[in-house]
Amino acid sequence: MKEERYYFSFDSCEQGILLRTLNDKKTDLIRNGKSTDAVDELIVKVGTAPTKKFKVVERSSAYAR
């Protein structure tokens, strides 16, 4: 069975906030003597994520029902 993938859209400010939050979590885990492998992988994925241009289509409230 094919693994599901999720895609998120972040601007550079949001990406920075996410990286700082992950780094804070990593620091907390180190202080508690726990493994940081999962957080390390996420930091690499978020930090090296490719950029892609796309269009956002807004719909009027009449269609949103």
Image (cartoon, rainbow, N blue to C red):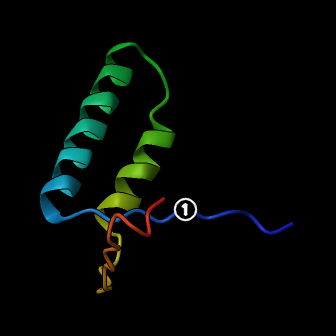
Residue at point 49%, 40% (across, down): 37
**Farthest front residue in view:** 62
SS class, disc 1? loop
Residue nearest the viewer, comparing 32 with 65 = 65
Residue nearest the viewer, comparing 26 with 51 = 51
Q: Is residue 37 left or right of residue 18?
A: right
Residue 9 drawn at (x, y percent): 33, 65
Query: In the picture shown, does residue 49 fall above or below 19?
Result: below
Number of numbered discs on residues: 1
**Circle 1 residues within 10 Å: few <14, some 14–19, many ≥20:** few
Q: Is residue 17 left or right of residue 3?
A: left
Residue nearest the viewer, comparing 5 with 31 = 5
Residue 64 drawn at (x, y percent): 44, 63
- The residue tagged 1 is 6
Residue 44 drawn at (x, y percent): 37, 58
Residue 35 drawn at (x, y percent): 49, 28
Q: Is residue 48 left or right of residue 35?
A: left
Residue at point 25%, 37% (across, down): 21
**Farthest right residue in view:** 1
Residue at point 33%, 32% (across, down): 26
Query: In the picture shown, does residue 26 fall above or below 5?
Result: above
In the rendered image, which quarter is residue 27 located in?
top left
**Farthest left residue in view:** 13
Query: In the picture shown, does residue 16 fall above or below 10?
Result: above
In the rendered image, which quarter is residue 30 located in?
top left
In the rendered image, which quarter is residue 46 located in?
bottom left
**Which quarter shows the N terminus?**
bottom right
**Amino acid residing under circle 1:** Tyr
Residue at point 34%, 63% (across, down): 61
